[in-house]
Image (cartoon, grey):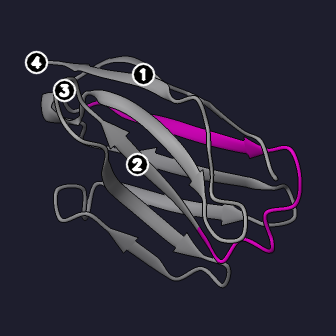
Amino acid sequence: QVQLVESGGGLVQAGGSLRLSCAASGSIFSAGVMGWYRQAPGKQRELVATITRLGGTNYADSVKGRFTISRDNAKNTVNLQMNSLKPEDTAVYYCNAGYPYNSWGQGTQVSVSS
């Protein structure tokens, strides 16, 4: 099992940027897919972006062109650069390590004011 800790959330004005980081307690190299998800109040958790072990990426349509996911297997970190933030991006953001770990972090709050 790998433990995940997110950081980097906060309050930002619309149009601003934030960089989220996810630090793993152990090696994430074995995790085929790492990802970021978010959950807004009253809504289901949704996919934001994923990245494979070799760097292949996938993004939700709502964040394409604004968010960039990256992964450093040597440092056991996954980052999410978020630019041109919108109020609808407000949510708790969670890091996920896929198979074989299937682990979630505790989440970090991102709030975007209009």
Spatial distance from mark 3 to mark 4, Cα to Cα?
5 Å
Q: Which residue is mark 3?
A: 14
Q: Are marks 2 and 4 in contact (CB under 8 Å)?
A: no
- Determine contact: label 3, label 4, CB under 8 Å: yes
Badge 2 marks a residue whose secondary structure is strand
Q: Earlier in the sequence, mark 2 or mark 4?
A: 2
| The quadrant where residue 97 appears | bottom right
Identify the secondary structure beneath mark 1: strand
Q: For the residue marked with disc 2, what is the amino acid?
A: Tyr
Location of residue 101 with respect to 24 vertically, above or below: below
* For residue 101, side relative to residue 18 (left or right): right
Nearer to us of marks 1 and 3 is: 1
Residue hosting label 2? 37
- Between marks 2 and 3 in the image, the one whose residue lies nearer the viewer: 2
Whole-angstrom CA distance, mark 2 to mark 3, is 20 Å
Q: Nearer the viewer, mark 2 or mark 4?
A: 2
Task: Give the CA distance from mark 4 to mark 1.
Answer: 16 Å
